[in-house]
Image: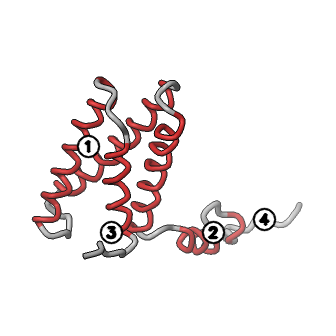
């Protein structure tokens, strides 16, 4: 008879070994970086619509939906009582999210420009990147 199988697992036998976990930690973005990347992606899609026009309806819908979903998630996070941002900042973000939602409807129904959405996103991205507004 052969040797009994070993009952101890080696790191390579585990899908999430210590080494894999350490690598995952290194590649996990800080929340601020993740938010910046999310805004960058939504803004990139809106810029594509601004550059290419409204003819590609699917592209327009996807860009506006992604942006609105991002703002909705941000507002939901700000509405959470455990959010550590100052109350006034949270209220302002929720107010902006409401504006984004309403204006997004105007983009779709009244064919308003996506440029104001891009502008607001860029301001938020500048804040996330630590840039300050010029006086």
The residue mark sitting in front, 4 or 2, is: 2
Q: Assess disc 2: are there few (<14), some (14-19) or many (≥20) residues with their C-alpha within 10 Å of its C-alpha.
A: some
Q: Assess disc 4: are there few (<14), some (14-19) or many (≥20) residues with their C-alpha within 10 Å of its C-alpha.
A: few
User: Which residue is rendered at x = 27% and y = 45% of the image?
Assistant: 72
Give the quadrant of residue 68.
top left
Q: Which mark is residue 100?
A: 1
Judged from the image, the secondary structure of the residue bearing numbered disc 4 is loop
User: Which residue is rendered at x = 30% and y = 23% of the image?
Assistant: 109
Between discs 1 and 4, the one toward the N terminus? 4
* CA distance for labels 1 and 4: 64 Å
Quadrant into which the N terminus falls: bottom right
The residue mark sitting in front, 1 or 4, is: 1
Relative image position of residue 59 (x, y in whole percent): 50, 31
Q: Are marks 1 and 2 in contact (CB under 8 Å)?
A: no
Using residue 33 as the reference point, say whether residue 75 is left or right of it.
Answer: left
Q: Which mark is residue 16?
A: none
The residue mark sitting in front, 1 or 2, is: 1
Q: Which mark is residue 127?
A: 3
* CA distance for labels 4 and 2: 28 Å
Instruction: Give the answer, above or below, for where 129 lies relative to 117.
Output: below
Residue linked to disc 4:
4
The residue mark sitting in front, 3 or 4, is: 3
Relative image position of residue 108 (x, y in whole percent): 33, 27
Q: Which mark is residue 20?
A: 2
Judged from the image, the secondary structure of the residue bearing numbered disc 3 is helix
Q: Are marks 1 and 4 in contact (CB under 8 Å)?
A: no
């Amino acid at each position: 008879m052969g040797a009994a199988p070993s009952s101890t697992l080696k790191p390579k036998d585990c899908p999430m070994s210590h080494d894999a976990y350490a690598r995952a930690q290194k590649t996990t973005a800080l929340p601020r970086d993740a938010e910046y990347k999310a805004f960058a992606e939504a803004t990139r899609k809106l810029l594509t619509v601004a550059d290419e026009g409204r003819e590609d309806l699917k592209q327009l819908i996807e860009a506006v939906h992604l942006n609105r979903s991002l703002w909705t998630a941000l507002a939901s996070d700000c509405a959470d009582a455990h959010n550590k941002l100052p109350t006034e900042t949270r209220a302002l973000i929720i107010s902006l999210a409401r504006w984004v939602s309403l204006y997004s409807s105007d983009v779709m129904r009244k064919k308003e420009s996506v440029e104001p959405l891009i502008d607001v996103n860029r301001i938020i991205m500048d804040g996330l990147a630590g840039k300050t507004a010029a006086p």
